[in-house]
Each structure stands twice: as C-alpha cells, then as structure tokens.
Amino acid sequence: MTSSLKLGLMLPATALVLSACTMAPKYERGTLPVADQFPTPATAQGASAETLPWQKVFLDPRLQSVIYEALVNNRDLRIATLNAERVRAQYSVQRAGLFPGVNGTVSGRQAKDTPDSYSADVGASWELDLFGRVRSLSNAALNTYFASAENQKAAKVSLIASVATAWLTLGADQEQLRLSRETLRLREESLSLTQKRFDLGATDALGLRQEQTLTEQARADVAQLEALVQQDKNALRLLVGVEVDAANLPDALPENAVLSDLPVGLPSDVLLKRPDVVAAEFDLKAANANIGAARAAFFPRISLTGAVGKASTDLNNLFDGADTWSFAPSISVPIFAGGANVAGLEGSKKARDIALATYEKSIQTAFRDVADALAVRSTIDTRLTAQTRVVEAASETEALSRARFDRGVDSRLTLTDAQRTLYGAQQGLITTRLTRVLNLTRLYSATGGGLQ
C-alpha cells in the first residue's frame, strides 16, 4: 500500500473523530436578568396558565370556532409557518456539507490526429472538518431553524390572543350599542312627552332643551357605536382570514367566555418557556456557533477528491474498458487575507453579544408583560364589584328622581342628572367587564399560551 493511499485512508478516520468537536465557546445560560418573584404573585391554584391549552381558557363555543378558523386561514401565521419551513430547508443544505458529495460524469474527446477517447467516472469530494468549521455552520443553521419554529409558535400565541381580544371587544361594543339604542328609545319617548307638555305650557323651554340634549347625545352614541361595531367586525375578519359566520359573532359580552382565573408560576418556570424567549435563546446559540466557524477560518482546510471509472477508445464498449481511479487530497492554508479572518471573528463575537442582549431584553419584556397583567388582575375584581354597586345605586337614584319629578317635587334638571349618571355607570360596567376578560387573555398570552 502506497504512502499516499495510507494517508487517504487515515485522514477520513481522523476526521470522524475530530469533526465531532468545534471551536465554538461553551454555551452557558446565565442568570435571569429579572427578579425571582413577580411583584404581584399569583394566589390561584391548579394548572399553570402557560401549560393550559387554549381550548380550556376560551370557553365559548363560538369563540373557539372563530379561533380554529383563524389558525387555518390567517395569512400572518401562514407566512410564519412558511418561514420556518424555509429555514429548515436551509439547514438541510448546510448540514449536507458534513457528508461527501458524490457525482457522476460521462465525457468524450474527439481529435483529428489522435484516437477518440471516452470515460465514465463516479467522483466524491469531502471537506475534512478537522477544526469544526462545517459543523459549527451546521449547528448555527440548526439553531436558526429552531428559532424560526419558536417564532412560528409565538405567532400562533399572538394570533389566538388577538382573535379572542377582537371577538370579546366586539361583544362589548355590541352590548354598548344595545344600551345606547335602548337609551335613545327612552329619551325619544321622554322628549315626545316633554314636547307635548311644552306645547300645553306645562313645562318651560329649559326642560325641553335638556331633553333634546340628552336625546341627541344618545343618538350620537348610537351612530358612533354602529361604526365601531363594524370596525370590530372588519378587524376580526382580517385576523381570521375569511368571512366569519354570523352565528359565531357575539351580540353581547358573555359572562363565561374566558376561564375565570389563571394561576401563574415562578418567573423561571414561565419566562423561559415563552416562545419568543426560547427563539431568542436559539438565536444566541446560533451566534455562539458562528464564533466556532470564524475561529476555524484561521486553520487549514483539507479536502479530499477521488474518482473511479472506466476509460475506452470505443464509446460502445466504454464499460468494458480499462479501470481508472484518482485520489487528490488538497490543503488550503490561510496566509494573508487582509485581516478578513480577524474581522470575521470579531464580528461574530459582537453578533453573539448582540444576541445575548436581545435574549436578556426578551426575558425582561416577558417579565413586564406578566407583571402588568398580574397587577391588573389583583385589582380588577374590586373594580368590578364597585362598578356594579355604582350601577345599582344610580338605577335606584334615577327611579327615585323620576318618581319625585312626576309628583312635582324635583325639577327636570335633577332627573336629567340622574339619567346621565345611570347611563354612564352602565357604560362603565360594560367597560370594566371587558377589561377583566381582556386582562385574562393578555395574561394567558404573556405566559406563552400553553404551546411549549
């Protein structure tokens, strides 16, 4: 066995051992750049919010149907999914560099003064990854794919929350519109009676103008809310990606559309599972792997090229011709690159530092999202109870004022103020109920939405 053939057999074996290693720095997850506890800790017991599937959080069957439609038809989610598939294909291309490339060729030569010659070869070429350059690039591509997959999950979490928010907001605005229409109807009736009393001289112009003011205010509210409801439907249609069945649209804000409470665990349990945080960590790992590729650029690159085949002067008898083979190892040693390798290494380190800062910022942002949602949750029930009592008190006040006005005890101004207070209190109650369910939706989304 010749020395060159021995070398050809030894180099692949050596490469198999060494190529399992890279020159990338060892990846270590640092400490969380946030507090160990949320400022407003959760007190509820049960399955944690980040592990609950969305079907157990959004309970209204109509809302579930709309979310299902959105997951199938939403264009942004479709784009995120296609991006993940595209990056996966790019990883497959990069990973192929770890294995020999094999190709076949058939060639022929005809010349005037020499015999014709034909050959058929099967050749293979392989870069021996002695210093982990190819493997580092493959690891970087793999982590980039993982990041894109997590970004697709994050898009899904965001879509579910956005659809739920739009659907619930539509329900609340529908309820506000119904309240405004009923208020307008009552005020038009009151205005008609006041106009008759004014024509008979039983009331003055001030009382008539006050009734007209309240009536036109209610009419303006109805017009505004009609436009708002249509805008809500437009927003929901865009999120879903298709026309939403009217049977699945809410005509009011349901009482039990969302799970009444969502327990939340410790920051380390919640934040490190959120898809956008996980994606940022994969980006950090990819940047870490690119440092290994940049370091390997300072060392020689060894490639093996070999071929076996047949050669003949007769094309018809080509595969009965003489055997041929070739083996050509090559070594490329970096001598002078004008500082490109140094700059490449420095750039990869800065990219890693940027990825680290981005990862830490994503954790801090996630921490604030959850903390803000918990802060609202800790006070919203008190607000809701108080607003309910406000409506009850305002309703009793309006009834008493109307009775006193009918007996001539109180003026029209007193009754008008009571009506205006009741109307505002009823609007405030709908808004507070909406705030509560939207806060639960936001909390679920902020913890990762059960899609780990």
Image (tube, rainbow, N blue to C red):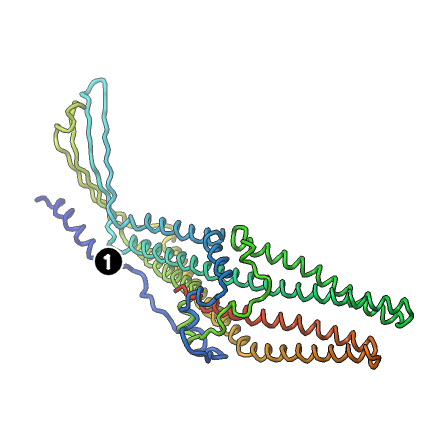
Q: Quadrant of residue 285?
A: bottom left
Q: Is residue 248 left or right of residue 426?
A: left
The quadrant in which the C terminus is found is bottom left
What secondary structure is found at the residue carrying circle 1?
loop
- Where on the picture, by quarter, is residue 53? bottom left
In the rendered structure, the answer to whether residue 42 lies left or right of residue 136 reads: right
What quarter of the picture does the N terminus occupy? top left
Residue 6 at x, y = what percent?
12, 47
Near mark 1 (Cα within 10 A), the count class, few <14, some 14-19 or many ≥20, is few
Measuring from the top left, give residue 136's x and y in whole percent: 31, 56
Q: Amino acid at mark 1?
A: Ala
Q: Provide residue 199's location: percent of width, then percent of height.
A: 90, 66
Q: Position of residue 221 (x, y in %)?
A: 71, 63
Q: Which residue is mark 1?
A: 20
Residue 190 vs 388, above or below: the answer is above
Query: Does the rendering let one see residue 431?
Result: yes
Q: Is residue 163 left or right of residue 119?
A: right
Q: Residue at x 83, y 78 (%)?
A: 411
Foreground residue among 193 and 222: 193
Extreme residue toward the left, this view: 1
Q: Closest to the observer: 262 or 75?
A: 262
